Image: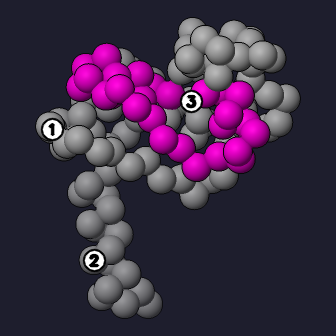
Amino acid sequence: MKDHMTLDLAATIRDAAHPLTGAASDYDPLLERIGDARFVLIGEASHGTHEFYHERALITRRLIAERGFRAVAVEADWPDAERVNRYVRGTGDGATRNGCHPAAGARDWRDLYP
């Protein structure tokens, strides 16, 4: 038998969850909650899944385009992050539009810069 706390937690998650359908409006509720925040922290428990990087790219694009964010800080290996930084700033010496590093996950950074 499930205890009361487990049932409450499940109900809380169910009430707060928002399904992702692939629609352009999927993250509208998230951006509404963000409001005029100056900082948005996007955590991850997956450490390297393509799906996470893809969804993070969608959210980040909207934060830049719709909320005027001008900086993105991420947890990443230093060499990979530095190559992306050089590419974004136009000072790269190896990062390309088709991928910044052959390491798993880094290829998904290009999703931010189509």
Q: Residue at x 14, y 37 (%)?
A: 36
Answer with left or right where residue 14 lies relative to residue 81. left
Q: CA distance from mark 3 to mark 2?
A: 31 Å
Name the kind of residue labelled 1 in the image.
Gly
Instruction: From the image, state whether disc 3 or disc 2 is nearer to you.
Output: 3
Q: CA distance from mark 1 to mark 2?
A: 28 Å
Q: Earlier in the sequence, mark 3 or mark 2?
A: 2
Q: Name the one closer to the observer, 102 or 20.
A: 102
Q: Which quadrant holds the N terminus?
A: bottom left
Q: Which mark is residue 63?
A: none
Q: Looking at the rendering, which quadrant does residue 78 occupy?
A: top right
Q: Earlier in the sequence, mark 1 or mark 2?
A: 2
Answer with left or right where residue 5 lies relative to residue 98. left
Residue 55 seen in the figure? yes
Q: Looking at the rendering, which quadrant does residue 92 occupy?
A: top right
Q: Name the one closer to the observer, 17 or 78.
A: 78
Picture coordinates of residue 52, whole percent (x, y): 57, 40
Membership of 94 in magenta stretch = no
Can you say whether 113 is above or below 9 in the image? above
Name the kind of residue labelled 2 in the image.
Asp
| Residue named by callout 3 | 54
Q: Which quadrant holds the C terminus?
A: top right
Pointer 3 local density, CA inside 10 Å: few below 14, some 14–19, many at least 20 = some
| Residue named by callout 2 | 8
Pointer 1 local density, CA inside 10 Å: few below 14, some 14–19, many at least 20 = few
Q: Are marks 1 and 2 in contact (CB under 8 Å)?
A: no
Q: Main secondary structure of the magenta part?
A: helix
Q: Which residues are drawn in magenta?
A: 57-85
Q: Residue at x 48, y 53 (%)?
A: 43
| Residue named by callout 1 | 35
